[in-house]
Amino acid sequence: MTSNKSVNQGVAPVTYGDGTRPPRGDYASARADYTCDQHWERYTPQEHALYQRLYERQAAQLPGLACEEFIAAVSQLGTPQEIPRFDVLSVRLKQATGWEVVAVPGLIPEEAFFGLLAQRRFPVTAWIRRPEEFDYVVEPDVFHDLFGHVPLLFNPVFADYMQAYGAGGLKASRLQACEHLARLYWYTVEFGLIATPAGLRAYGAGILSSTGELRHSLQSPAPQRLGFDVERIMRTQYRIDSFQGTYFVITGFEQLFEATAPDFTPLYERVAGLGELSADARLASDTVY
Ligand code: PHE
Ligand code: CO
């Protein structure tokens, strides 16, 4: 019934930066909360093969560089031979931590993103990059979203942090503090390092889904690695088009959860009054690893 009033009218597409590139995803068939159907049956054999190549290249690099919690959970994604079915993966994830994976057409607005996280629903882009983007893709695709983010959602403490972040995001929107809160996401969920007895390891999805950045973040003398500090992070700009100049190191996922538990309202006010710090700034108060 195409005349039915409930027929999907779609949502506004979301693009990065100046938005000159047309959005890739099919926003016209997304629901009001920006979720859509994965349409697993539409992936081509070439797309499944591309996923497998990405997965296997990245999995081979993890030992000694990724944190143990991540390595232990990667196999929960299922066989590397094909792009996982989100509904099947969600059954395992729900059982472990109460999270589920939902399909989205690509980038979604901040509020929609926060709302899904607050409900323990992790948005994963349905499409996969093109073969010529094997090494680098500008927007997050299904490989980044799944391989980078989903393994740690199997960890109970990290899973709770992600939900708290979503709820905190909804609050930050009301306080007009999203830019400061986004930096926390960037320097933890995307580019976080963790100190372990065996040495520094990566837990951030942007690092773990990138071939070059995994080594850069942990082994290059170029970037600085500083102790985790919420206020410091909220003041610090970040780079979206090159490897990071600074990484922040947590001592455990409990630290992440506990440091972000207090009410951020006074913190947002304080941070707004302090100066911005460049992506490679160094303060006398920084703990250097
Ligand atoms: N405690 C934060 C607040 O009151 C919410 C939050 C939790 C933000 C976890 C980020 C991560 O706003
Ligand atoms: Co990401």
Image (spheres, rainbow, N blue to C red):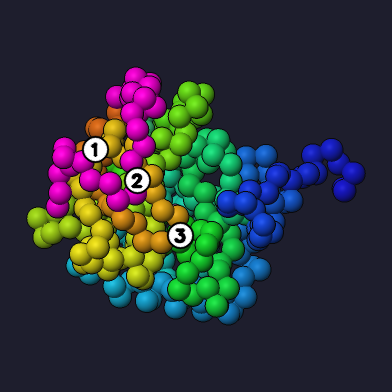
Give the Cα separation between the discs numbered 1 and 2. Answer: 16 Å
The residue carrying mark 3 is 241
Three-letter code, disc 2 = Ser
Does mark 1 have its CB less than 8 Å from ligand 1?
no
Task: For label 3, count other residues whose C-alpha is less than 10 Å away and answer few (under 14), some (14-19) or many (20+).
Answer: few
The residue carrying mark 1 is 229
Residue at position x 41%, y 53% in the image: 239
Q: Is residue 114 above or below residue 90?
A: above
Q: Which residues are magenta?
A: 262-289
Please tell me whether residue 268 belongs to the stretch shown in magenta. yes
In the rendered image, residue 234, in percent from the top left (x then y), is placed at 35, 36
Residue nearest the observer in this picture, 52 or 174: 174
Residue nearest the observer in this picture, 282 or 229: 282
The residue carrying mark 2 is 278
Three-letter code, disc 1 = Asp
Residue nearest the observer in this picture, 35 or 229: 229
Residue nearest the observer in this picture, 100 or 91: 100
Q: Is residue 98 above or below residue 22?
A: above
Residue at position x 47%, y 64% in the image: 143
In the rendered image, residue 183, in percent from the top left (x then y), is placed at 39, 42
The answer to which of marks 2 and 3 sits earlier in the sequence is 3
The answer to which of marks 1 and 3 sits earlier in the sequence is 1
SS majority, magenta: loop
